[in-house]
Every structure is written in structure tokens, then in C-alpha cells.
Amino acid sequence: MSNHTAPSIDENTRRYYLDVMGVQCWQLRETSEKIIEKNGNNLTWEQFENEVQSCTHCQLHQSRKQPISGRGNSNADLFFILLAPTQSDDENGKLCDGEANTLLNKMLSAIDISIDDVYITSLLKCSVPSVHTVSPKEIQSCNIYLQQQLQLIQPRLVVVLGETANHCLFQKTLSLEDFRAMNADSPQQINAIPLFSSYSPEELLQRPENKRHAWLDLQQIKKILGSNKT
């Protein structure tokens, strides 16, 4: 018998899962695959950016200052996914900006990777108001853009940063520690690309004691990238 207790989750995540009950994961993937099939294999970055910039598929476009598709190397081997741009990102027009950017830069430098060589995006391309609860519809509406980015970049490893981002992508109410355990015990994939779970820079800024765990994740990431070289 397991002695694990159910992990506590924040109200935003709890509400998300109350809404998503009964919606199977394959429904989100099927929707995206159909749209990708319509686009064919000739999607360009210009077309992608135009779609994101003009997107009004969910209510988040009403409160955003600007949509932020992502940033970084369009040929990156390493692909990071956050939950959404912060309010500061929305103001500055740059995802993972400020202290979060400085910390991520230092973390990557520690494993000899330049932040200019990776790609950083988010599940949602619009910032989320502080009193707003993320809905399945919003995740689904933006899922096509994530699929398009993966299609354009074709990275060798996708790293999902942050507990709530992992909740929303995997649609599982696990703690981040449980998601991290899956890295070795039951590795996941997205579009046949290996998935890896770790802390977001924002989480590490709030709880710096977890940096030692993040360092272990970084070492695993470096090992995976090294072993996947062709």
C-alpha cells in the first residue's frame, strides 16, 4: 500500500482540473494534428508569427499588451516550455525576462550551453491576469502554436519548466517532484521528442533551496543531449 498523500495544488491548478474532467488528452493532440495536417510541411516562421500576433482564439487576447511566441535559436536542440509570459514579459515583449533570464542564463552556462543556443516558449502565448484561472480551452487554443514550433525547430529534447506548466501539459495532478521522477522512471514524449520536467526560474527565485535539485536536472539534461547526438 502506498503511503503517498495527495500533493497540495494551488487554486488555479485545482480549478483547471475541475474544468478538464472528462476531457481526454487525445482530444487536444487530435485537434492539433488536424490543423498541422492542413498546414502541411511548408509552414514558415513568418506565417507562424503572423498567426500568433493576430490570435483571438481565447479571452486572454483581451487583456494582453502583446502576444509573445517565444525567443531563441530556431535550430535549437534544447527547447524549454514555460506556462505563460509574466506581466513583466508582457510589458517588455520578451519571454523569461529580468531576473528569470539572468538565472536561466547562469544555469545553462553551468553545463556549457549558451542561452542563445536554446529556444524558450510557453504553453500560453499571452500573459495571464493575476486573478484569472487558466482554462482547458485556453491551453487547447494555444496548443497548435506549440505544435507548430516543434515542427519548425525539431529539437532533440523538450524541457517543461514549472509545476503548473507540467500540470497543464501532462493533465496530471502530480507534484513537481513526481514529474521529475518520471524523467528517469517513465520518460514521456511529445511528437516523438523526449520530454523532461524541471523547475522554472521563477520557482527557483522564490525557493532558492531547490537550486541544488535543479542542478541535478541540468546534469541529466546535459547527459541526455550528449547521448542523443547523431
Image (cartoon, grey):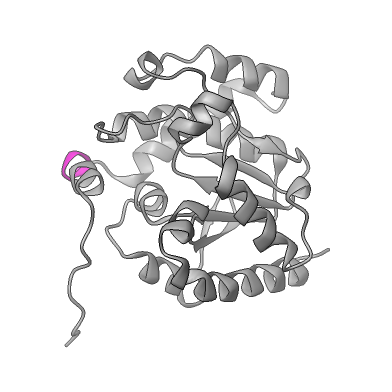
- In the image as oriented, which residue stretches furthest toward the right? 230
Place of residue 216 in the rendered image (x, y in percent of width and height, measured from the top left): 58, 76
- In the image as oriented, which residue stretches furthest toward the bottom? 1
Does 183 appear above or below 65? below
Which stretch is magenta? 18-22
Does 91 appear above or below 21? above
- Relative side of 156 to 6, left or right: right
- Relative side of 205 to 18, left or right: right
Closer to the camera, 209 or 111?
A: 209
Place of residue 227 in the rendered image (x, y in percent of width and height, measured from the top left): 75, 72
Which residue: 61% across, 56% down?
A: 103
Which residue: 74% across, 52% down?
A: 77
Closer to the camera, 104 or 52?
A: 104
**151 in the magenta segment:** no
Closer to the camera, 97 or 58?
A: 97
Does 92 appear above or below 214? above
Assign the magenta stretch its main secondary structure: helix
Place of residue 60 in the rendered image (x, y in percent of width and height, measured from the top left): 36, 22
In which quadrant of the rendered view does residue 62 lie? top left
Q: Quadrant of the N terminus?
A: bottom left
- Relative side of 64 to 147, left or right: left
The mark total stands at 0
Place of residue 134 in the rendered image (x, y in percent of width and height, measured from the top left): 29, 35
Which residue: 71% across, 18% down?
A: 46
Q: Quadrant of the C terminus?
A: bottom right
